[in-house]
Image (cartoon, rainbow, N blue to C red):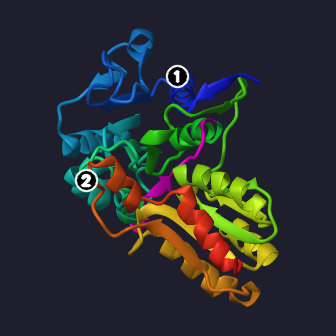
Amino acid sequence: MRELTFREALREALREEMKRDPKVFMMGEEIAEYGGSYKVSQGLLEEFGHERIRNTPLAEAAIAGAALGASLVGMRPVAEIMYIDFSFIAADQIINQIAKLRYMTGGMVKVPVVIRTQGGGGVAAGPHHSQSLEAIFAHIPGLYVVMPSNAYDAKGLLKTSIREDNPVIFIEHKKLYGESCPVPEEEYLIPLGKGDIKREGKDISIITYSRCVNFALEAAEELVKDGIDVEVVDIRTLKPLDEEIIISSVQKTSKAMVVYEACRTGGFGAEIAALIGEKAFDYLDAPIRRVASLDSPVSFNPGQEQYILVNPEKIRAAALEMMGK
């Protein structure tokens, strides 16, 4: 099977959905001639033209508001917010309008808006370009939140998100764009709310998402040498959340570690830990462990950034401690 990068898989998903449905179009800052800040839309302008690949001003509130308006007249916009850090500028449109309108009209209107954005650290981009803000959007009723960890999942989940009649926040980690994996050429979709076991194991369940899946898999390979067999659960969508796959894994291993790149306090991992406490407590034979980034802005300094962010070494250390080694 061929391999695609995360970036190429996203581009292919966009191309396929735009060919399938003429109502799908893209809008965002520098997405046309320049191809987007991370080149996901590169080449799509030549294929679909300016009517469907639309540059916008540097005005996130306008991007989100225009996407909402377009969806109300039957279009299916894919709007790009260049960095999730800038989504606060569009917060009123996303949180108070896009998320609420279907509910407020009693289902009389659909809001098929996909907001693609990217988050996370690891490239020394500093406090304004490195945040992990997914928990904020997962907290808002009416929004779906998707965070894929590899190219295969990214393509299948983005295609499903574009066909969804409710608004989706689709968050891509900036360090994944160059990562590749096998992606089939034939059509496929991945349902929202369906997690995936990325590695089978029997000693500890690591429940995670986005780039931290790769960190967990890397740590798992090292932990094998320590005699610890880790199961890695990729939830893939924060909302809807696949509760069953999490609980089943904890039933199997009796130990749960939740890993996420966001700051520890108030991160989405706390929600997962609470779920395990409520619905799988009787299966646990050790306290639930959270491994997250420090409660700190992300530094421009690469060394400080590594100190702040979660990484495979921190996951391995926590696993060793959980197993008493």
| Cα–Cα span, label 2 and label 1 | 33 Å
The region drawn magenta spans: 138-151
Whether 171 is drawn above or below 103: the answer is above
Residue 166 lies in the magenta-colored region: no
Whether 316 is drawn above or below 68: the answer is below
Q: Give the x, y percent position of residue 37.
A: 33, 29
Q: Main secondary structure of the magenta part?
A: loop
N-terminal-most mark, 2 or 1 = 1
Q: Residue shown at 46%/46% (left/top)?
A: 170
Closer-to-camera residue (195/181): 181
Closer-to-camera residue (252/275): 252
Residue under label 2, please give it: 127
Q: Residue shown at 72%/65% (left/top)?
A: 245
Q: Residue furthest bottom?
A: 282
| Amino acid residing under circle 1 | Arg
Q: Residue shown at 22%/43% (left/top)?
A: 60
Residue under label 1, please give it: 15
90 relative position to 206: left or right: left
53 relative position to 316: left or right: left
Secondary structure at badge 1 equals: helix
| Amino acid residing under circle 2 | Pro
Task: Identify the image quadrant of residue 38.
Answer: top left
Quarter of the figure that contains the C terminus: bottom right
Closer-to-camera residue (227/104): 227
Quarter of the figure that contains the N terminus: top right
Residue 139 appears in the rendering: yes
Q: Give the foreground label among 2 and 1.
A: 2
263 relative position to 323: left or right: left
Which class describes the residues within 10 Å of circle 2: few (<14), some (14-19), or many (20+)? some
Q: Give the x, y percent position of residue 121.
A: 38, 49
Which class describes the residues within 10 Å of circle 1: few (<14), some (14-19), or many (20+)? some
280 relative position to 70: left or right: right
